[in-house]
Image (tube, rainbow, N blue to C red):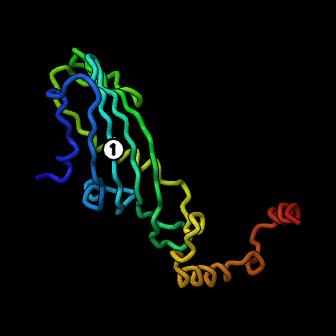
Amino acid sequence: MKPLQQYIIPYSGLKIGKHNFEFEVNETFFNEFEYSLVKNGEVKVDLELDKQETMLILSFHIKGDIKIGCDVCLSDFPYKMDVLERQIVKFTGDVNLEDDTDEIILLPKTEHEIDVSSLIYEYITVAVPYISRCDDEGNTEWCDKDMIRKISELSGSNNEDNITDADPRWDALKNLKK
């Protein structure tokens, strides 16, 4: 069985109304996406599918811990996430589906299932902070002390006082800082 097969929902046999689905997302899921920001985690996805005559409304509640890399010490640390998202899927009779947008996904009426794995991956990836640091989460025990020490040593040799200026035009800007 393919790893992402479990994220395909056959909606054609479902009655009109709300239906609930649960998915577990872990390392196997993230390995299916090349160049993923997230490599590991334990996440639970609660999906409410509201089937209507002309559309599906997908309501996602994604909650759990993912492992992300610290931008300071480069070690992995757990990041708690709790995401609520909604996606609308409209049925169309047209074969031309060029009008797809971020808010609305268009599916032909002949389609009978929807793959939500890419939506789940997108919502998790968007929830990753742009700048991630261990100490922002209050997890100072996750910071790699040896790496911090090594970075301090290496950055000490590049101190502003030790650099000889090759271009005198920068001297006027240095006076602004004082």
Q: Quick one: 72 or 83, which is closer to the camera?
A: 83
Q: x%, y% of residue 156? A: 68, 82
Q: Is residue 104 left or right of residue 3?
A: right
Q: Is residue 7 left or right of residue 143?
A: left
Looking at the rendered image, the quarter that the C terminus falls into is bottom right
Q: x%, y% of residue 96? A: 25, 19
Query: How crowded is the residue under tag 1: few (<14 C-alpha within 10 Å), some, or many (20+)?
Result: some
Amino acid type at circle 1 is Asp
Number of callouts: 1
164 over 13 or under it: above or below: below
Residue that appears at 53% across and 66% down: 71
Disc 1 target residue: 46
Residue that appears at 34% across and 33% down: 58
Residue that appears at 23% across and 39% down: 115
Task: Residue at the far left: name it.
Answer: 1
Residue that appears at 60% across and 64% down: 136
Q: Secondary structure at mark 1?
A: strand
Q: x%, y% of residue 97? A: 28, 22
Q: Is residue 178 left or right of residue 42?
A: right
Q: Quick one: 10 or 129, which is closer to the camera?
A: 10
141 over 110 or under it: above or below: below
Looking at the rendering, which quadrant does residue 8 occupy?
A: top left
Q: Quick one: 107 or 15, which is closer to the camera?
A: 15
Q: Quick one: 48 or 86, which is closer to the camera?
A: 48
Q: x%, y% of residue 127? A: 47, 49
